[in-house]
Image (tube, rainbow, N blue to C red):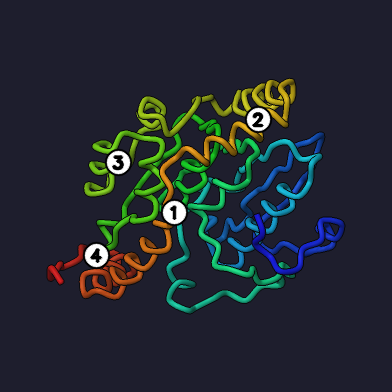
């Protein structure tokens, strides 16, 4: 993993993160999404901050695993569409620009350390990159899992590719083209979620898994995850799929869907 031209893990904690919080404790790096005023939607610099934290974990042999969690009642609402349109919120993040485009859907594949997603809020659209990419997903009872893109004139292209790696293809397609909310118990049954826990027990359940992983060889786990990455089907699909998303946003239906969403009305589709 070589995402930044200049990276020094010794100065990692001198950086200022504007969109996430970082805590390192006893071989565990916890990354908390902290853009609650925007439902933790993925701002471009937020993605850079997450990638920078991953680079730190990759370069630090004392980090054995990562935990991804979020503040607020929405774990992640997906991509920040305003930012994708060039309306980028100013921030005081000091994280440098990466040396290549960061694609969340591919970020998890090269860390070679277990990642645990602790999901205590609703997940929509691009938020599923975190769930599909993680080694283990612990979800709280009652959270909502939604793919509403087709109702906005869009399509979850990259999310579909990530979900197909952990869920049956027919279920993924059904979910993508119908755009409904998937109950968390059903998400567990189809392989997206590892375990469902109550709000009272989710911290305990997560900590139990962390302690179990600590009792195993971090070297063996890392080599196993590297092997898993090697044998999975290769491809650079996320770059292509991101361009497909941009093309769909630019279509008449895409523009109508987004406008209708902003105006809180039903869209009038034109089929073009």
Q: Residue 126: which numbered mark, if any?
A: 1
Q: CA distance from mark 2 to mark 3?
A: 29 Å
Does residue 54 sit above or below 272 in this rendering? above
Query: Mark 1 or mark 2: which comes first in sequence?
Result: 1
Mark in the foreground, 2 or 3: 2
Q: Give the number of marks.
A: 4
Query: Mark 2 or mark 3: which comes first in sequence?
Result: 3
Residue that mark 3 sits on: 172
Residue that mark 4 sits on: 265
Mark 3 residue crowding within 10 angstroms, few (<14) / some (14–19) / many (20+): some
**In the displayed structure, does residue 173 sit left or right of residue 269?**
right
Q: CA distance from mark 4 to mark 1?
A: 23 Å
The front one of 140 and 58 is 58
Q: What residue lies at 28% left-to-right and 38% top-to-bottom?
A: 169
Q: CA distance from mark 4 to mark 2?
A: 50 Å
Task: List x then y, in percent, for residue 48.
Answer: 62, 63
**In the displayed structure, does residue 6 sit left or right of residue 223?**
right
Task: List x then y, in percent, for residue 79.
Answer: 46, 61
Q: What residue lies at 36% left-to-right and 33% top-to-bottom?
A: 183
Query: Mark 3 or mark 1: which comes first in sequence?
Result: 1
Q: What residue lies at 27% left-to-right and 36% top-to-bottom?
A: 171
**Residue 215 seen in the figure:** yes
Residue that mark 2 sits on: 221
Mark 1: secondary structure: helix
Mark 3: secondary structure: helix
Does residue 208 sit above or below 169 in this rendering? above
Image quadrant holding the N terminus, namely bottom right
Mark in the foreground, 4 or 2: 2
């Amino acid at each position: 993993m070589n995402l930044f031209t200049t990276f020094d893990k010794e100065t990692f904690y001198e950086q200022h993160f504007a969109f996430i919080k970082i805590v390192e404790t006893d071989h565990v790096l916890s990354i908390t999404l902290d853009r609650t005023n925007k439902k933790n939607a993925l701002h471009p610099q937020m993605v850079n901050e997450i990638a920078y934290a991953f680079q730190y974990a990759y370069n630090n042999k004392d980090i054995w695993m990562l935990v991804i969690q979020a503040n607020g009642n929405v774990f992640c609402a997906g991509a920040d569409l305003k930012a994708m349109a060039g309306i980028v919120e100013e921030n005081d993040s000091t994280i440098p620009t990466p040396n290549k485009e960061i694609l969340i859907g591919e970020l998890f594949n090269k860390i070679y350390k277990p990642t645990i997603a602790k999901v205590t809020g609703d997940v929509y659209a691009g938020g599923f990159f975190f769930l599909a990419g993680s080694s283990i997903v612990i979800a709280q009872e009652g959270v909502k899992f939604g793919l509403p893109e087709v109702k906005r004139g869009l399509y979850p292209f990259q999310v579909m590719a990530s979900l197909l790696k952990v869920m049956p293809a027919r279920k993924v397609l059904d979910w993508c083209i119908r755009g409904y909310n998937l109950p968390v118990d059903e998400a567990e049954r189809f392989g997206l979620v590892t375990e469902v826990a109550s709000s009272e027990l989710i911290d305990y359940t997560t900590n139990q898994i962390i302690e179990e992983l600590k009792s195993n060889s971090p070297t063996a786990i890392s080599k196993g995850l590297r092997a898993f990455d090697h044998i999975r089907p290769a491809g650079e699909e996320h770059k292509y799929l991101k361009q497909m998303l941009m093309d769909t946003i630019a279509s008449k239906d895409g523009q109508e869907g987004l406008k209708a969403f902003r105006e809180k009305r039903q869209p009038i589709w034109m089929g073009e």
